[in-house]
Amino acid sequence: MPLVELLLENNPLSDKFDDKSIYVSEMRGRFPKLMKLDGVDLPPPISFDLEEHSLPIPIQTFLCNAEGGSIVRQFLQQYFSLFDSNNRQLLTQAYHENAIFSITIAYPYGTEDKG
């Protein structure tokens, strides 16, 4: 039976959140069917009627060379840290002034895209 109502008012956990929307989002992330939080009715959760096996299986990495993984992870961590901050100005260093979109995909010798 999924949890639909939760009362954490005056609980140290609820006091950690200054932003009410983040608090609601975090609780909904843990309890997707939550309809009432701290005595307040929540809007209906957004959900999709998908079969359990209809989504693709996530793959951690598509890197052909595992040694490059640490560089990619470091870049992504720094990029999204700046992206999620209040000042995205520092992200301009990650872009070429004429860039629109670029992607590089290389398949190891002897393999091909079967997709």
Image (cartoon, helix red, strand yellow):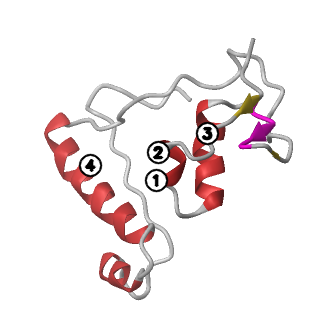
Magenta part of the chain: 33-38
Q: Is residue 21 above or below residue 66?
A: below
Residue 30 — which label? none
Whether residue 23 sits left or right of residue 111 in the image: it is: right
Location of mark 3 (residue): 8
Residue 38 place in picture, x, y as percent: 71, 43
Observer-nearest residue: 17 or 65?
A: 17
Whether pointer 2 and pointer 3 mark residues with C-beta atoms closer than 8 Å, the reply is: no
What residue sits right under mark 4 in the picture? 73
Categorize mark 1 by other alpha carbons within 10 Å: few (<14), some (14-19), many (20+): few
Question: Are the residues tagged 1 and 2 within 8 Å (C-beta)?
Answer: yes
> In this figure, which residue is indicated by the disc labeled 1?
16
**Quadrant housing the C terminus:** top right
Q: Answer with left or right where residue 93 lies relative to residue 18.
A: left
Cα–Cα span, label 1 and label 4 = 29 Å
Residue 64: image x %, image y %? 26, 35
Amino acid type at image mark 2: Pro
Distance between the Cα atoms at labels 2 and 4? 33 Å
The reply to whether the magenta stretch includes residue 35 is: yes
Residue type, numbered disc 1: Lys
